[in-house]
Image (cartoon, helix red, strand yellow):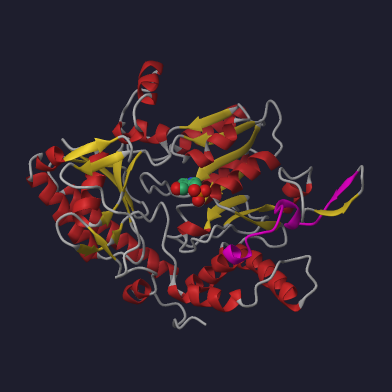
Amino acid sequence: MFLIKDKEFEPARFRRDIVGIKHKVPTLRKKRLQYINFDNAASTPALHPVLHEINDFLGWYSGVHRGTGYKSLLSSQVYDNCHEIAGKFVKADMDNDTVIMLKNTTEAINKLSYRLALTTGDIVISTVMEHHSNDLPWRRHKRVEYAGVNQQGQLNLLDVEAKLRHNYPKVKLLTVCGASNVTGHLNPIHDLAEMAHEYQAKILVDAAQLIPHQPIDMKPAANPRHIDYLAFSGHKLYAPFGSGVLIGPKSTFLKGAPEYTGGGTVSMVTSKDIYWGGLPDREEAGSPNVIGAFALAQTIKYLQKLDMQKLAQYEDDLTHYAWNEILKLPGVKMYGAFPRVGVITFNLAGIGHSLLGSILCYESGIGVRTGCFCAQPYVRKLLEIDENQEKVSAYLEQNPAQLPGMVRISLAAYNTKSEIDRLMNSLKTIIASKGQYKRNYRFSESHGHYVPKCSQPLKLQPVHN
Ligand SMILES: Cc1ncc(COP(=O)(O)O)c(C=O)c1O
């Protein structure tokens, strides 16, 4: 059991629970430096107490749902409970909703795009600020309208409403991210839900970037501000074990056939007919990722012991601190506004995003992310790049690392101000070098990123610290 006092958030304590937090990594100049992970929006590390729980459970693990042995029965019960734990964590309406365990947010949104069984003439309203995973699955239905953003990249709520009104009653779904993976902007999901419901549309919230930062309350189905569908990934919530979640009304999934069929989805099969099983089984074809679901549920239990409001406050302080420090740099351009979760994107004059990312890795042992973050239309908008066909075809011939983009640092509740200070020192040194680093690096087509000219690229293997 977790040794945390209920409803506390103690940053140092949380940091100690992070797997690999003390790892040092090789760099060019010094032998090894303690690694700083500022790429939490991509994925978060695991928690030691959860690893212990997994270790204990592995001895009891067996195939679920069809086995008759004790371990199968126990594993089935544990696995089924994981659904309830995930649903309750976001205050899903458990009478109305089903919780489906999948691989990640991308799979969850793809599933929903299939299961909504949209027909010609139906319209989905999305936004310009979405991750490709909450954009491309809807495009196969052809009619997607994109609500715009203002110059800082904040969602234009009036545009959302205008699109709902103009297309009424054809709009079946409004789909928005809870928080952006590019600017960290928070969308007012309950206002948007109310708006969608007024026009008889449903709302999907892509909570991939919201879930690690703030408590989520889907609210009861009868509440006009409730969230109809919610998707999130375990690996962005300190549970990198291959599980994700889709929550939505049972009625959506009881209609028609699931997109994946096979073992576990049926109650009866004859040579001619298929009788689908109950929920969520019919939506979880094949043998499920029991350990992944268990890890997610244990992580949720751990997080439920924390005071999420305090955690959010700690992250907010850290984000303001980092923002204000980066803003002081000469030649910096920063994107977006507040309120936001701990995602900060910027560019430095005279040094490309990809090169900067590589220098931070090779010289400073700091992990960031660069490029367009799987949100190319949004990033182009923020960079004020005109999307015309000529440019797009020219872009297609280049390596993505050489295309326009940004540097992103994404913070989590285990990061510290002293880590930000180390980043700032590195950035100041890079700026002061007046292009020296630029001369020391070359773009490697085979690696897809910049590497130092003087030495071999770093040998990539776990280092025993
Ligand atoms: C806002 C947002 N939505 C969806 C996704 C896709 O998540 P996953 O790769 O876990 O499916 C991401 C991943 O970065 C994201 O940031």
Position of residue 196 measured from the top left corner of the image (x, y, whole percent): 59, 41
Position of residue 365 measured from the top left corner of the image (x, y, whole percent): 24, 57
The image quarter in which residue 256 lies: top right
Residue numbers of the magenta segment: 273-293
Asked if residue 317 lies left or right of residue 127, the reply is left
Residue 334's place in the image compared with 28, above or below, is: above
**Residue at 61% across, 77% down:** 59
Asked if residue 57 can be seen in this view, the reply is yes
**Residue at 58% across, 57% down:** 218
Residue 185's place in the image compared with 144, above or below, is: below
Position of residue 55 measured from the top left corner of the image (x, y, whole percent): 54, 76
The image quarter in which residue 346 lies: top left
Magenta stretch containing residue 276, yes or no? yes
Asked if residue 201 can be seen in this view, the reply is no
Asked if residue 194 lies left or right of residue 183, the reply is right
Position of residue 178 measured from the top left corner of the image (x, y, whole percent): 48, 49
Q: How many marks?
A: 0
Residue 263's place in the image compared with 153, above or below, is: below
